[in-house]
Image (tube, grey):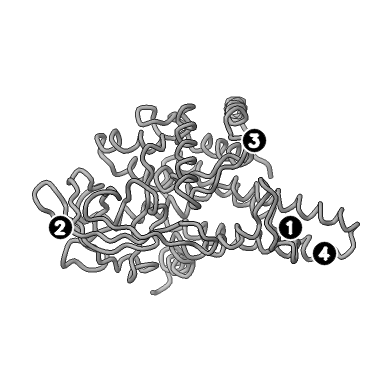
Amino acid sequence: MRLEYTPEQQAFRAEVRAWLEAHVPAHPLEHYDATRAGFEAHRAWEATLKSGDWGMVTWPKEYGGRGLDLIQWLIFEEEYYRSGAPGRVNQNGVFLLGPTLMEFGTHEQKQRFLPPMASGEEIWAQAWSEPQAGSDLAGVRATATRDGDDYVLNGHKIWSSRAAFADWAFGLFREPGSERHKGMSLIFFRLDQPGVTRNPIRKINGHVGFAEIFLEDVRVPAFNLLGEEGQGWHICMATAGFERGLMLRSPARYQVAAAALADLWQSRKETSGGAGADPALEADVVRAFMNAEAYALNIYQTASRLMAGAKIGPEASTNKIFWSEMDIHLHQTALAILGPDAELLPEPGAHEWLDDYIFSLAGPIYAGSNEIQRNIIAERMLGLPR
């Protein structure tokens, strides 16, 4: 099955492709988690995107977007990944908080936060997880106490993506004395303000991908509350729906990787003259390619449903399990093809199969562990008992 595009969509694709060809850096940027310099280089790229109004194409123009639909966003993502453009350092903002702000924020909050998010002027971190609240997010203990026109925040967050270098964080806090899913609120705070301490956490590759955050009597204006007090669990579940079901992992990411995998397999076969080519590996390459295409079709269907007025529901959990396990299989296949060569550093600009494989192993954990996703599917989609 192949997707068919309207002449207007094809013209839009040509516009995106031409702009990216003219603006994508000739040489890859240092990874945004590697150093502060790499982070700032990616911030500058976000500003370049905004100069063409590509920061987040689905947002209204008044908030820094183009007012386009989700199908056009998918087309943009396809061209973006195929061009080799830099990774989006502000993905926590534009793909997670941005859609949540669009749904739950006031007009004044959208005016304040969305344009600098689209331009990269303000980079966002996600501050949900805590030492005792990872997959069990309802167990957060960090508190928000109302004091006049402010909230006073206290607590300890960990595994906060981008928090080592980011400007802002959106955190989940509870009213003192409340329990589990009740009494929680989603609140924004600056990471450089008094009372905030952040300690970088290095990943296995040495990059500073996370930070733990300590908050001690951190005062933020009540304006920074998203939605209503006590609505935090409902709001963060909507954010998780965007993360699992649509925005965070666009199909183009895997389509490009699957195409690179097919090229890798073909080049290895030609180099060896076909000797030692394992038929099982060829089947895995085909499976990876088919999985990426199936995932793309599913996301196009989801986008079409949302454009018709539907909401993302518990089916996002099935999507999250699929893309996270597909990612691991794809990269395991690449390492099997490469054999011992997988441990060698790649040429500049080449696909980093080993590094991407290591990252793929985190997929079944972040955005809600796959074990929790299977519970959601069982209870909310199949109606099975807890």
Dot 3 crowding, Cα within 10 Å, few <14, some 14–19, many 20+: few
The residue drawn where x is 40% and y is 74% is 385
Identify residue for label 1: 285
Please name the amino acid that badge 4 sits on. Answer: Pro
Q: Residue furthest left?
A: 148
Please name the amino acid that badge 2 sits on. Answer: Thr
Relative placement, left or right, of 56 versus 224 is right
Labels 3, 4: front one: 4
Please name the amino acid that badge 3 sits on. Answer: Glu
Label 4 vs 1, first from the N-terminus? 4
Identify residue for label 4: 279
Asked which secondary structure carries label 3, the reply is loop
The residue drawn where x is 67% and y is 64% is 332
Asked which secondary structure carries label 2, the reply is strand
Please name the amino acid that badge 1 sits on. Answer: Val
- Image quarter of the N terminus: top right
Q: CA distance from mark 1 to mark 3?
A: 25 Å
Identify the mark at residue 181; answer none if there is no mark: none
Labels 3, 2: front one: 2
How far from the left and from the top, in percent, is residue 32? Answer: 49, 48
Relative placement, left or right, of 170 versus 12 is left
